[in-house]
Amino acid sequence: MQETLFCFRVGHLLPYAMSYSNTTHFINPSSFILLGIPGLEAAHGWISISFCVMYMIAVLGNVTILFIVKREPSLHGPMYYFLCMLAITDLVLCTSIVPKMLSIFWFNSREINFSACLTQMFFVHCFSTVGSGIFVAMALDRYVAICNPLRHSTILTNRMVAKIGLAVLLRGGLLLLPYPFLASQWPYCRTNIIPHSYCEHIAVVKLACADIRVSSYYSLSLAIFLTGMDVFFIAASYVQILRAIFSLPTKDARLKTFGTCGSHLCVILVSYIPALFSFLTHRFGHNVPLHVHILISNAYLLVPLMLHPLIFGMRTKQIRDRLIRLVILKGTKLFS
């Protein structure tokens, strides 16, 4: 088993492995051991710096967006409510992963409780799905605002926005609940060592000494169905948006209208392209080294979380102007 080889390759994990060496069968191990990024142990310190920087940018950026939207009554509208939902989702997602990951890299704290591992698994996959649903909601908001502007305020009322947000959250929660439920049912009798930096679903269930095709097929079907459906609705919305933009009479009007969608398109691209690359590499890149798989898996989660607030901060004029005004105001008070 590849997982067992990792046990012998990393000397300081031998005590954990030996504690289970005399156990032939355990349904639910008390804990799992996360290896971090196997094969790159010497570089864990440098890798942790980049992950820590991305985490700090994601937290600071998303908290800033939430603060600005809450502070400015003029930003209390559907577009910014969805942006706040995305910010909260990103905060939950990165906080579910990075603190434990950094504890592995910095303090060699590799052990994670069985229940905590399943909880992390649920939060990571659930809120990744929620984030994808919010992209669809944001595309819907842009579609109504550009293609049917006179009815925007009557269609996307605060109540409707709240219903959409609740539907997106319930979709993610209900569809991803079988992940930890099924994982908790499998018997784990070979090893409890996970060759990954967090409790990724497939990385965990592969440790089970049982037929895990139900988990594997459900995971694959869900990824194809949800991602395909979300990408279809986003693409359909933006096709209609682009048709409306190109039908405008002047170039300035077209550029101004397209500018309102630019940040959304950038965020969607930086979110779906790395995820697609990771999915294809995981499914078909059998000759790709394990540490490359794990690095890609981490990057497709963390890089978009860092870029989301940066893109919205730079490309959304209303947020950019309020942020600059806030910085100038604070600076004036500081030096006055």
Image: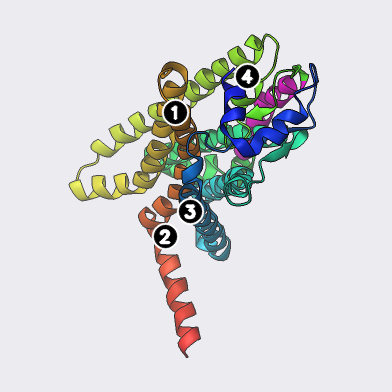
* Numbered badge on residue 49: 3
Q: Secondary structure at mark 1?
A: helix
Q: Secondary structure at mark 4?
A: loop
Is the residue 151 above or below the residue 64 in the image? Answer: above
Q: Quadrant of the N terminus?
A: top right
- Image quadrant of residue 234? top left
Q: Circle 2 is placed at which residue position?
A: 318
Amino acid carrying label 4: it is Lys
- Residue count near mark 3 (Cα–Cα under 10 Å), binned few <14, some 14–19, many ≥20: some
Q: Judge left or right: residue 166 versus residue 24.
A: left
- Identify the magenta region: 164-184
Magenta stretch: dominant SS? helix
Amino acid carrying label 1: it is Ser
Amino acid carrying label 2: it is Gln
Q: Circle 4 is placed at which residue position?
A: 206
Q: Earlier in the sequence, mark 2 or mark 1?
A: 1
The location of residue 33, given as percent across then percent down, is 67, 34
Q: Secondary structure at mark 3?
A: helix
| Pick the front one: 68 or 102 | 102
